[in-house]
Image (cartoon, grey):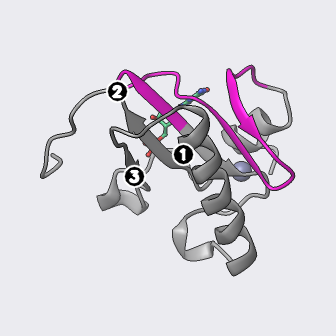
Amino acid sequence: MENCLFCRLVAGKIPATQVYADDETFAFKDINPVAPGHILLIPRRHMENMLDLDDATALAMHRALKNIVAAEKLEKGFRVVANTGEHGGQTVFHLHWHILFGRHMGWPPG
Ligand code: 5GP
Ligand code: ZN
């Protein structure tokens, strides 16, 4: 997927501040953070959104999430967001989980 921003990023063609990596996933700091901590966790393999997520990759994403939460010491809590499609506010169409932390999160979101 040479036109996909996050495929290019995971291939090292676009610089990113890596925070975690394993064989199936990659995580890096969001370029435009909306919280004191704002990490994006993505599968290395291109898939558009949550509905394309297969069981094996879902497991890998969840394992990566737990590793990041432990490494970042997020015992006070965090929020995971997967904006999906037009009404979900998705702007990059390679699945990513926003991991937000470092402040109290309001609810409901705008
Ligand atoms: P979405 O709006 O699709 O849920 O989230 C896309 C996210 O990607 C946004 O939070 C945006 O700041 C982030 N983003 C867009 N381009 C780049 C980039 O080149 N590098 C990084 N690190 N983040 C990006
Ligand atoms: Zn992609």
Circle 1: residue type? Val
- Name which residue lies at 62% across and 74% down: 52
In the rendered image, which residue does mark 1 sit on?
Answer: 92
Circle 3: residue type? Val
In the rendered image, which residue does mark 2 sit on?
Answer: 102
Q: Classify mark 3 as within 8 Å of ligand 1 or not, answering yes or no.
A: yes
**Which numbered disc, 3 or 2, marks the residue closer to the eye?**
2
Residue 97 lies left or right of residue 71; in this view the side is: left
Residue 14 lies left or right of residue 72; in this view the side is: right
Say above or below: 27 vs 90: above
Task: Determine whether label 3 and label 1 are within 8 Å by CB.
Answer: no
Query: In the rendered structure, which segment of residues is drawn in magenta?
Result: 14-39
Residue 3 lies left or right of residue 23; in this view the side is: left
Q: How far apart are marks 3 and 2 (CA)?
A: 15 Å
In the rendered image, which residue does mark 3 sit on?
Answer: 81
Task: Determine whether label 1 and label 2 are within 8 Å by CB.
Answer: no
Q: Where on the picture, by quarter, is residue 95?
A: bottom right
| Pointer 2 local density, CA inside 10 Å: few below 14, some 14–19, many at least 20 | some
Q: Where is residue 9 in the image (x, y as percent from the top left)?
A: 75, 33
Q: Does the magenta stretch include residue 85?
A: no
Q: Position of residue 21 (x, y in %)?
A: 78, 40
| Pointer 1 local density, CA inside 10 Å: few below 14, some 14–19, many at least 20 | some
Say above or below: 100 vs 61: above
Q: Position of residue 39 (x, y in %)?
A: 53, 34
Which one is earlier in the sequence, the residue at label 1 or at label 2? 1
Q: SS for tag 2?
A: loop
Q: Position of residue 101 (x, y in %)?
A: 37, 33
Which one is earlier in the sequence, the residue at label 3 or at label 1? 3
- Name which residue lies at 36% across and 58% down: 86
Q: Does the magenta stretch include residue 18?
A: yes
Q: Classify mark 1 as within 8 Å of ligand 1 or not, answering yes or no.
A: yes
